[in-house]
Image (tube, rainbow, N blue to C red):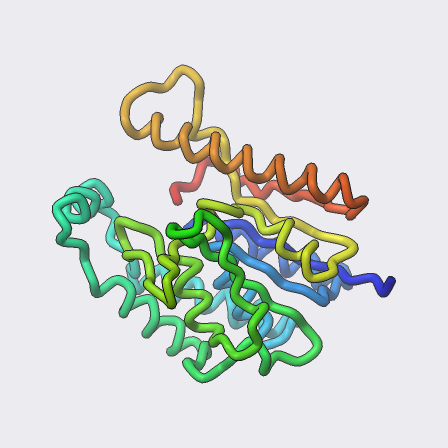
Amino acid sequence: MKEKLAFALSGGGARGALQVGALKALIEAGYQPAILAGTSIGSVNTAFLAINGVTLASIDSLIEAWRDAEKAELLPSNYLWLTVRTLFQRPLSHSLHRMEAFFVSHGLSPEKKYGDLKDITLLSVAADLNSGKAYIYGLDPQQTILEGVLASTALPPWIEPIEKEGAWLMDGGAVSPLPIEPVINVGATHVIALSLADHRNAATSAHGFGPFFNKLLFTVEKRQIDTEMALANSRRISVHLINLIGEIPVPL
């Protein structure tokens, strides 16, 4: 069997900037993946590299894109207000359009398809709320990368799920926060997994809605990652899991 190295990048919102530094270190060390897979913000980082090349020059451009995103304020910070609007069926619709415009302005052409990529396989993970399963963009070469990234990052209450051919797609973190299983299924023999899970926000002594929400995310995320790691172990696939944690907790 031909060996295939995969980079699997988790979701994690604003923490995704930590993945850029890790990717730079991996490229400097000579690692070149045959497969890139990302969930949520990880899908953004992997799509950028797949389109522009897994090079240090691409990393420099990705750093600049992150700086632009910081200034753009793509997602409103008042998530409680947004949640109330969503509950009363009055969600904001402009967030998706702002995200799409930002991606396009940074080189993610609406016409670019997964099948257009050469020498690398790209997977973008979304969750289908109708089937309860992962929806993997990239298995169909005719799908557009922009659609895959938008579906993988569609996180309520900021962005409504996307309807597509009977599927109702949202942020892939609901089913595969660290996409190890997807890369195994397309032939990865070795995996470097960059996780943004930071469990410091799930302190056992904290109570209230905020801590409850963080603990809920921690529970779902840990269960999914443990399951996919166990799958890799059962198939004797080497996974090097790297937890990217800053000096202080970074909000999503």
Answer yes or no: is residue 14 visible: no
Across and down, in percent, residue 187 comes to: 74, 60
Across and down, in percent, residue 85 comes to: 14, 48
Image check: 52 left or right of 156? Answer: right
- Relative to 226, is 113 above or below? below
- Relative to 154, is 209 above or below? above
Q: Image quadrant of residue 91?
A: bottom left
Q: In which quadrant of the rendered image does the N terminus lie?
A: bottom right
Image check: 188 left or right of 101? Answer: right
Across and down, in percent, residue 154 comes to: 36, 57
Q: Which residue lies furthest to the top in this view?
A: 205
Q: Which residue lies furthest to the right in this view?
A: 1
Image check: 114 left or right of 148? Answer: right
Q: Residue at x 77, y 53 (%)?
A: 190
Image check: 49 left or right of 65? Answer: right
Quick one: 248 or 207, which is closer to the camera?
Answer: 207
Answer yes or no: is residue 107 visible: yes
Mark count = 0
Q: Residue at x 49, y 31 (%)?
A: 199
Across and down, in percent, residue 116 comes to: 58, 82
Q: Which residue is drawn at 53% across and 44% down?
A: 196
Q: Image quadrant of residue 222?
A: top right
Q: Which residue is drawn at 63% across and 75% down?
A: 53
- Relative to 34, is 142 above or below? below
Q: In which quadrant of the rendered image does the C terminus lie?
A: top left
